[in-house]
Image (tube, rainbow, N blue to C red):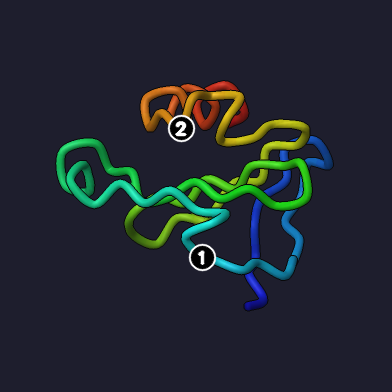
Amino acid sequence: METTVYNPAKGRHETIQVTFDQNKTTWFEEELISEGGYSITDIDGDLLICELGYTIPMLVQEMTRAAINYDLGKARELLKQHQ
């Protein structure tokens, strides 16, 4: 699926192809309301962080779900660092 993301390494929005499936994506359904998180997805050695609502997903280059231990809190820290 074509998705518009913000790439902080490039300082701009871009459109990329993303496949959200159980092998590449971790969903945080329990934390949706309390934490505002939605999902983290591996894309060719980069990490896509999607939040609940109308925010644009952020693509963090050279990062993976495993590197942040599949942790929503660490994903949210990455969002803060790159805003």
Q: Which mark is residue 21?
A: 1
Which residue is under mark 2? 70
Which numbered disc flags the more N-terminal residue, 1 or 2? 1
Q: Quadrant of the C terminus?
A: top right
Coordinates of residue 14 in the picture (x, y in percent):
76, 61
Coordinates of residue 15 in the picture (x, y in percent):
74, 67
Q: Residue at x 66, y 45 (%)?
A: 59
Badge 1: how crowded within 10 Å, few (<14), some, or many (20+)?
few
Q: Residue at x 38, y 32 (%)?
A: 72
Q: Residue at x 56, y 50 (%)?
A: 41
Distance between mark 1 and mark 2 Cα atoms: 15 Å
Q: Is residue 7 above or below residue 69?
A: below
Q: Which mark is residue 32?
A: none
Q: Is residue 37 above or below residue 78?
A: below
Outermost residue to the right: 10
Q: Quadrant of residue 62?
A: top right
Q: Quadrant of the N terminus?
A: bottom right
Q: Quadrant of residue 45?
A: top right
Of the pair 23 and 17, the residue shown nearer to us = 23
Cβ atoms at labels 1 and 2 below 8 Å apart = no
Name the amino acid, label 2. Answer: Tyr
Name the amino acid, label 1. Answer: Asp
Badge 2: how crowded within 10 Å, few (<14), some, or many (20+)?
some
Viewed as shown, does residue 60 lie left or right of 68?
Answer: right
